[in-house]
Image (spheres, coloured by chain):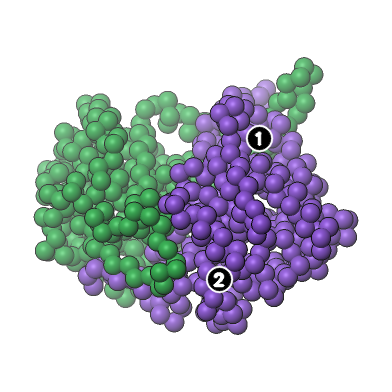
Chain colours: A purple, B green
Amino acid sequence: MADAKPQDSGAAEGNLAEEFAVPSQVEEVKSRMAEFAERHGAAGRRVVLITSGGTKVPLESRTVRFLDNFSSGRRGASSAEYFLDSGYAVIFLHRHRSLYPYTRLYSGINLLDALTVEPAEDRSARVSVDQSALPNIAATLKRYQAVKSSGLLLPVEFSTLSEYLHLLKAAAQALSSIGSKAMFYLAAAVSDFYIPASEMPEHKIQSSNGPLQISMKMVPKMLSPLVRDWAPGAFIISFKLETDSSILLERARRALDTYRHQAVVANVLDTRRGYVVVVTCHAQHELQLSDEDALNNVEIEERIVSNLEAAHRAFMLQG
Amino acid sequence: MADAKPQDSGAAEGNLAEEFAVPSQVEEVKSRMAEFAERHGAAGRRVVLITSGGTKVPLESRTVRFLDNFSSGRRGASSAEYFLDSGYAVIFLHRHRSLYPYTRLYSGINLLDALTVEPAEDRSARVSVDQSALPNIAATLKRYQAVKSSGLLLPVEFSTLSEYLHLLKAAAQALSSIGSKAMFYLAAAVSDFYIPASEMPEHKIQSSNGPLQISMKMVPKMLSPLVRDWAPGAFIISFKLETDSSILLERARRALDTYRHQAVVANVLDTRRGYVVVVTCHAQHELQLSDEDALNNVEIEERIVSNLEAAHRAFMLQG
């Protein structure tokens, strides 16, 4: 999310339903999120909404082609694990088929390469996991099952930009009841551009019509109504990914000045797994993995979550 | 692939390396494909090259955003299984992380939801598959392992349009030695449009620059040099997907008239899993699943492959 654009700050809220089709499940999901937040809030637990993965922007209404953002969802999925370890309840708003907490550790592996079949004496065959193909699988599975049965993880899926925008708004409203106990950790790679439904061709664009000119409007900045109207008491973190490190910090600070939320996690595409800067109103914290960390499979998300958990605690005491 | 565009018919071959960066692994992959084709051709086996999944078209050279095509790779992956069942050796040229033969049957399932852990008497835990969560897994696994050890399936991956185009050319050249024993089954959803490297910004496009205008060139039609120059003796099938059924057959026939290959498998987005038309120079065959077929989990790809296998056999006898 997140460039400075004063003129668009009010547009998002009013026009959302006009410009972006409302997904059918949004009210049902909103109820589930509200119930989740109330239950955990009442138990004195903090709740983080994590957004994760890229958004799909259709070029045709019966969609064959779409614009997408580079994002596997790795950062969101691994951060969810560290938030759970830190005692948070987690709403995981993620792109359909992007990486998922715990399962992400085996994402590059073909399932069938990791299984073995043993014929049994009766006619049933037993299928087992080859644990050398799925390192640490027994421990990961136990942790996954414990999280699942604890009710501390609520997964919600989106695919398109429209779905993302409506579900983010619904989540913000659902979390408003717990005030400063709520954190928004907006790690999804959200498109800055879209084609309004009214300007979208119905059918597949024909290549026989010649070269393609695509004209895209700017997506309204949701951070503005989120901070101001939907979740004014919450602790809100946006992310800023750039490929050019020379403009990174200036852009992060400009986003903070514009939206007045609590922090921007700034990172550069090539180094994002080993280095980020947490930029707040008064300070900036560089988080960097050392060579030793890398050898020990430490992940930068552990450091990010640790930093933000402490900042969130301080924020709640102030409020 | 595949619209009629006489003026671009020669462009692909000459300009490929200029307009589309050559992937580093192309020569190594070409050698493996050539060795595979020769080995199986010498054994009297037919070889099919299946292309599968959508192509990624970057908008920036350090890519954050890209254009993509709707395609899970389901049709290509399931067709590969039926070609293997029919005795073909299969080169499976597929988009990275698109659906894969056999594994595709479990693609919607979270791996960790399908496993159970049993503590053993010694400290090792045994991890087993819950076979109710992965229906028919023992039989599928045995078939997968048999195919793998037979050496009849050669998987090759692409992500971007450039990789696809270069690997398709390499495959065509690699298969030229077996003449009419080769089939090309071009099921991938290939972009019709791209941004030339020379016109691409290096860094992430900034949303602060305002609305986005994208101007895309047409991708050269590879079918033309494929049929004429690279694989003149082969049996070549292209696919035509439309959302508007009223233009489908006319466009399929126009592609055949232009490229003079052997067949177009024509299908409409909404009905593609139950109905296709195999259009050839002299005829068109409608293939449709009945309600009973659907109840029995028959897949349309079984019918498509059966139809084309027979046509390929007839083609080889003519040649």
Give B80 or A158, whichever is nearer the viewer: A158
Instruction: Give the SS element for disc 2.
Output: loop
Looking at the rendered image, the quarter that the N terminus of chain A falls into is bottom right
- Answer above or below: position of A9 versus B184: below
Q: Position of residue B18 (x, y in %)?
A: 18, 49
Residue at horizontal 42 percent and vertical 63 percent from the top: B206
Give B96 or A79, whichever is nearer the viewer: A79
Measured Cα–Cα span from mark 2 to mark 1: 45 Å
Three-letter code for the amino acid on which mark 1 is drawn: Val
In this rendering, which labeled residue sits more in front, label 2 or label 1? 2
Question: Residue A22's image quarter?
Answer: bottom right
Q: Position of residue A69 (x, y in %)?
A: 46, 57
The chain carrying label 1 is B
The chain carrying label 2 is A
From the viewer's perspective, tell me whether residue A1 is left or right of residue B248.
right
Residue at horizontal 28 percent and vertical 40 percent from the top: B23
